[in-house]
Amino acid sequence: MKVAACFLGLIFASGQFAAAAADPSLARLEQQIELLAHATDATVGVSALHIESGRYVSVRGAEPFPQASSVKVPIAVQIMALADEGKLALDKMVTLKPADLHPGSGRISELLFHPGVALSIENIMELALVVSDNSAADLMLREAGGPAAVTARMKVLGLNGIRVDRSIAVLLADWGGIKALPPEAEWNREMWDKLFDAVPEPEHLAARRLQTHDPRDTATPADMTKLLARIWRKDLFSAPYAAKLLGAMERCQTGKTRIKGLLPQGTDVAHKTGSVGGVVNDMGVITLPGKGGHVAISVFTKGSSRAEEISEKAVAEISRTIYDYFALFPASADTSPATPETVSPEGAR
């Protein structure tokens, strides 16, 4: 591993960004992001880092937002770290049981009706990241050691703003207003349908409002962007494991109208979306044209009471604005990529 990459990895791990000299154009970019955020009734948090130059913009970057399915990336980081440490084999086969069929998005619960199916951990991770399969995510979380192990890994990396507290199944139950779950051994697909259908709409909406302010399973855009940058730099674990993770994120099939929505056709984006009850998220690494480098970006929203498409449009417009800025100004004469200055997560320039 190159010395520069190791050095910058330490910067990101300690909560520091490589900072460029003060740049008024970055202040204007932040102002433009604020204006675009008003297109939705949601609260919007944005953090974007030009990885090669260290220039950074943030709007509510230090505020916690519900991760929803974006949490699948921190879980995958824990899986890859364990594999790199020799504590977990990616070719380990996991046999699915009826209780493993969890609610929400994905393919496993839709297609696998009968017992006897086994998948490797690597295939489970692929399903969780590429099609945002919730059953796969919870299987991956179990193999990762559970929520506390993932949160502990984030803390070791200096990312205290990322926390994992529940499985996706329990998280969705809480957001749906389900007050009591039977023992996990009794879970099955029909059970989930009955439980969600039994919640009156007013109780569902009340639970949704409550969960919007719940500190559990949240992340700050700033820390998620730091995590993305380190994944891209391949300094969290060995390069082959980093390549597997990035490859799955590059194949992500969800959120085509979010970060990727307004970018030029063919732009490479390794990303992961998240959606639940007024939450519309997308975060990833955008490859700029030519030798422009890469932008790690997190755009999170919460608290919307309007159609999801409205927040998705805001995410797309913010992402395109950030893309255009760094595509036009990929580096500047006063940029020092390896300057270990501590930068506030808000308004960092």
Image (tube, rainbow, N blue to C red):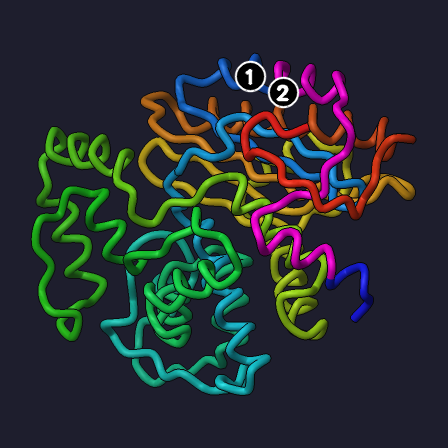
- At label 2, the amino acid type is Glu
Any mark on residue 34, and which? 1
Q: Which residues are the magenta region?
A: 7-32
82 up-or-down from 151: above or below: below
Judge by depth and name the residue closer to the eye, 9 or 36: 9
- Secondary structure mainly formed by the magenta segment: helix
Q: Secondary structure at mark 1?
A: helix
Q: Position of residue 260 (x, y in %)?
A: 65, 37
Q: Quadrant of the C terminus?
A: top right
Any mark on residue 81, and which? none
Report if residue 94 is visible in the image: yes
181 up-or-down from 319: above or below: below
- 210 relative to 31 in the view: left or right: left
Is the residue under label 2 in contact with that under label 1 (CB below 8 Å)? Answer: yes
Q: Position of residue 229 (x, y in %)?
A: 66, 51
Query: Which residue is found at the position 11% from the left and 59% from the top?
Result: 181
- 136 relative to 230 in the view: left or right: left
Query: Which residue is found at the position 57% from the left and 16% from the top?
Result: 36
Q: Position of residue 33 (x, y in %)?
A: 60, 20
Judge by depth and name the residue closer to the eye, 28 or 98: 28
Alpha-carbon span between mark 1 and mark 2:
6 Å
Query: Which residue is found at the position 51% from the left and 65% from the top?
Result: 76
Q: Is residue 81 magenta?
A: no
Q: Secondary structure at mark 2?
A: helix
Judge by depth and name the residue closer to the eye, 264 or 3: 3
62 up-or-down from 14: above or below: above
Circle 2 residues within 10 Å: few <14, some 14–19, many ≥20: many
Quarter location, residue 259 = top right
299 up-or-down from 195: above or below: above
Q: Dot 2 corresponds to which residue? A: 30
Judge by depth and name the residue closer to the eye, 60 or 344: 344
